[in-house]
Image: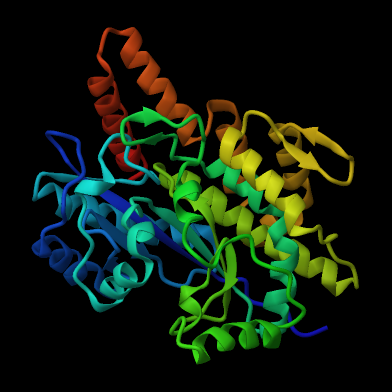
Amino acid sequence: MSAAPDFTIGIEEEYLLVDRDSLALADAPPELLTACQNDLEDQVSPEFLTCQIEIGTKVCRTVGEAREDLKRLRSSVAREAAKFNLAPIAASCHPFSDWRNQTHTDKERYNDLSSDLAGVVQRMLICGMHVHVGIAEPDRRVDLMNQLSYFLPHILALSCSSPFWQGYDTGLSCYRLTVFDNLPRTGLPPRMESFGEFERAVGALVDLGVIEDGSKIWWDLRPSSKFPTIESRICDVQPRLEHTLTLAALTQALTRMLWRLAAKNQRWRIYDTFLIGENRWRAQRYGIREGLIDFGRGEIVSLTDLMNEMIELVSEDAEFFDSLTEIEKSRDILKSGNSSDRQRQVYLDALEAGDDKKHAMQAVVKHLIEEFHADL
């Protein structure tokens, strides 16, 4: 058995920018990005659409370290945005703005995406959250990725923050994936036997000129093309900073738990992508409300029971990273609802109070602004 990985983490988040008066999406003026970059340097960057902005933490050993960095990043973006009468929200879809009214960032990478992916990419009015976990050994990355895929639907269910699209309730907890899955090279990762197999598959597309590099592989979980990490991309972005840390802590602890099994010559059972995909759909559709399939038991089990089991499963790892408090906050999400549940409740409360649909949707955006600032 090789030496233990360091399991460092890095978190990336994408935010939407809204006008504080209309609460609709607004383009980021160049001066805003410049001001953020002066403060945060390369930890902030533009995203595909001009109404988006992306941040990334430094490499952190624990979620405690990540909290301080993420708080600094969020605070800076919020402070600079306010100078332009804008506010960031960390939701994966804007409740009512139309994708047809957005423009993409004039940058070579995004111009190429717009040209290559045509009408599919024009609807990319979505934001995600990515968690990197440091695994130096390439083959170990792929081995752990094969096993970690089983838990992606569980994490997705907790993270859902995109129930609305263009002013109506989609009925889904995570509408983001219905948009994102229209892109090529998305969805659950295939099972691979080695990092070499992954490199050969990517290399075949690169040699054909189909993609430039592995950054155009957009699976829910992938070996990073830039860093010695596995990168979880399944999550909706979180309105609340503390919920971001809960999801990152779970991802880090689950990865170490699977490595511990390997150290004892054991492993998590690998199920067919078809079966994991059914749980992915259940999480996307129902969030935390209807449970997921436990394939070992052969029955649908509530998220509460599954999370209790998961917390017990990773308790040793949570103690190692001093992240048990953050991981146990997943129970708060189960109790009060994920963001999609909370957004729906705000919308229904506004309607019940006499607001029309337009003002009820605006109430949801106000709620998202408040949640973004709550933990700063």
Residue 329: in sight, yes or no?
Answer: no
In the image, residue 309 sits, relative to residue 51, either above or below, namely above
**Between 357 and 44, the one nearer to me in the picture:** 357
Q: Position of residue 69 (x, y in %)?
A: 38, 62
In the rendered image, the quadrant that contains the N terminus is bottom right
**Between 227 and 104, the one nearer to me in the picture:** 104
- At 11% from the left and 64% from the top, the residue drawn is 30
Corner quadrant of residue 200: bottom right
Q: Position of residue 360 (x, y in %)?
A: 28, 21
Corner quadrant of residue 266: bottom right
In the image, residue 289 sits, relative to residue 119, either above or below, namely above
**Between 82 and 185, the one nearer to me in the picture:** 185
- At 35% from the left and 46% from the top, the residue drawn is 90
- At 70% from the left and 76% from the top, the residue drawn is 142
Corner quadrant of residue 141: bottom right
In the image, residue 69 sits, relative to residue 109, either above or below, namely above
Q: Position of residue 82 (x, y in %)?
A: 14, 47
Q: Position of residue 107 (x, y in %)?
A: 22, 74
Residue found at the far bottom of this picture: 207
Residue 253: in sight, yes or no?
Answer: yes
Seen in the image, is 119 located left or right of residue 136?
A: left
Image colouring:
rainbow
